[in-house]
Amino acid sequence: MNLLEDPWVPVTAGDEPQQITLEELLCSDVSYALSHRRDDMEMAALQLLVCLVQAILTPEDDRNLLLRLEKPLDRDRYRRAAEAKKSWFDLNHQTTPFMQDRDAKDQNVTGIQKLLPGLPEGDETACLFNNKDDIQCLCPSCAAIALFNQATGAPSFGGGFKDPLRKANPITTLVFDADLRRMIWQNILPSDFIRNRFASHNDQRRDEPNWVDKITAGEKLNTSRIGLVRGLFWQPASLLLSWERERDTCSGCGAEAGMRVRFFGKRKFAYTLEGPLWPHPHSPRVLAKEKWFPVTYSNDIPPWARFSDIMIDSDEKEPALVLQHYRAIAPHSPLVLSVGGYSNKQALITRRHHDMITIGAGWPEHIDDIHGRVRLALAYGEMLEKKLYGFGENCSKNGKSFKANARDLFFQRTEALMHQSLQETKWDEEKAFCLDLAEKLEQVCRDIFEEVTTPYLSQPKGLKAYSITQRTLTKAMKDLRKPLEE
Ligand SMILES: [Zn+2]
């Protein structure tokens, strides 16, 4: 199957899910939306589409990009672009199979389920919702998406296999649009934006994926020499899918296909990466101790609370390049962000994430205002955690669990309020808005405090701890509100 020619994009146009070609998606005026049973596969399919279009149809500048957004692409224009690069994107190519390596044939043969992050791999890891043999076979579409997802956004297979170029569990942030064709273009970077940011763009050096321009075992590579296309499709592992010409129902998406894959070979392949973290255009980065790190998921912090890490541009923080670029082309519309990734403990995936955040129109100019709202809410959350920690220590020497409970409840109860707050656009009344937000946050904190402490009021220790904490809580909330009232 060739990703530039054959139908594989899992979509719906409001009816039955189907697989269409990239040409149909980019060149027709039908409004399609992605559709897959697994939310992480849907997010990965979007990223794969963005990377494919970036690789074959990079527009020269914003003017060209806006034309692409406006109307579907001419079919001849698409076919010429696809023809030039099609040997890179054939899943079963004789010499350069997509994201694979023929040298991995029959090596360390593994069940295909291992390509889908977070599914159990043996009897002992099966759980209530997933069995070790849920995924028996994949259709070419699911196999391509899973291969890409594993290589670019999930932890390595462990045991000496390398992590993706942007490390084990990066947060991906992409611009969302209900129309898939438009959504892809909104996440594409034009040549003039890329030029000084990536090696080998528009110069004589090659910018080819690493299954075409291969690296050799033991090689030392510098990340600053990795071009945009090479980095977007970086395959850290050496593997090969085993295709069977057999009609079967895909256990990934439920589609009937004439080809299936049940196993893949994987070969240990060592190389060394030197230099700074490659600036992946779909992920934010943070600087710590003079080194760049990817922003990753940690615990169960909701994405609104990560606003600073994914949206703020400073000396220590860098939002994904697609957002830095999008800021310039659409400053007057709201920004809908699709945020996704995995939480992990080493090679084990503990949770899948896929969330949406909407940020009100005018956000590029008012980013500090929005950040202020987020910081205000986080300050209330932290204060509540501290107070309930103190209460827990005073009445049962169990501060830690009170603190964790306070945190969970605070994030649950403020989710809707904070999503609304990110969308508010009455910029002239920002101060009044923040004061109102502070009052609502106080109410949430008070309610949680009462709820958590009530069961302890029948004990003398509990009653005493309650009255101390109630007093300090009121004082702390007053202090938080004070700067807003001045
Ligand atoms: Zn499938």
Image (cartoon, rainbow, N blue to C red):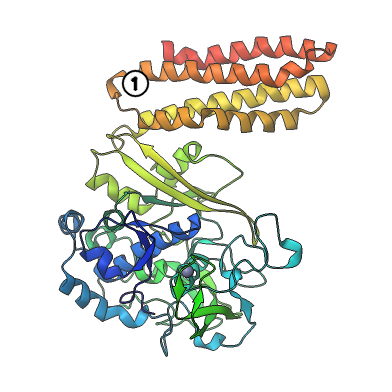
Position of residue 383 measured from the top left corner of the image (x, y, whole percent): 60, 23
Q: Residue at x 49, y 61 (%)?
A: 166
Position of residue 172 measured from the top left corner of the image (x, y, whole percent): 45, 53
Q: Quadrant of the N terminus?
A: bottom left
Asked if residue 40 lies left or right of residue 122, the reply is left
Asked if residue 235 lies left or right of residue 325, the reply is right
Q: Residue at x 62, y 69 (%)?
A: 157
Q: Single out the residue that lies furthest toward the bottom.
A: 94
Q: Residue at x 78, y 13 (%)?
A: 457
- Up/down of 50 relative to 320, above or below: below
- Up/down of 314 relative to 203, above or below: above
Asked if residue 229 lies left or right of residue 66, the reply is right
The residue closer to the viewer here, 2 or 480, is 2
Position of residue 27 measured from the top left corner of the image (x, y, whole percent): 21, 65
**In the rendered image, which quarter is residue 342 located in?**
bottom right
- Up/down of 247 relative to 345, above or below: below
Q: Judging from the image, what secondary structure is the residue with disc 1 in?
A: helix
Residue that label 1 marks: 430
- Inspect the image, locate mark 1, and give the three-letter code of the amino acid beneath it: Glu
Q: Residue at x 25, y 64 (%)?
A: 26
The residue closer to the viewer here, 90 or 282, is 90
**In the rendered image, which quarter is residue 423 located in?**
top left
Q: Is mark 1 within 8 Å of ligand 1?
A: no
- Up/down of 351 relative to 192, above or below: above
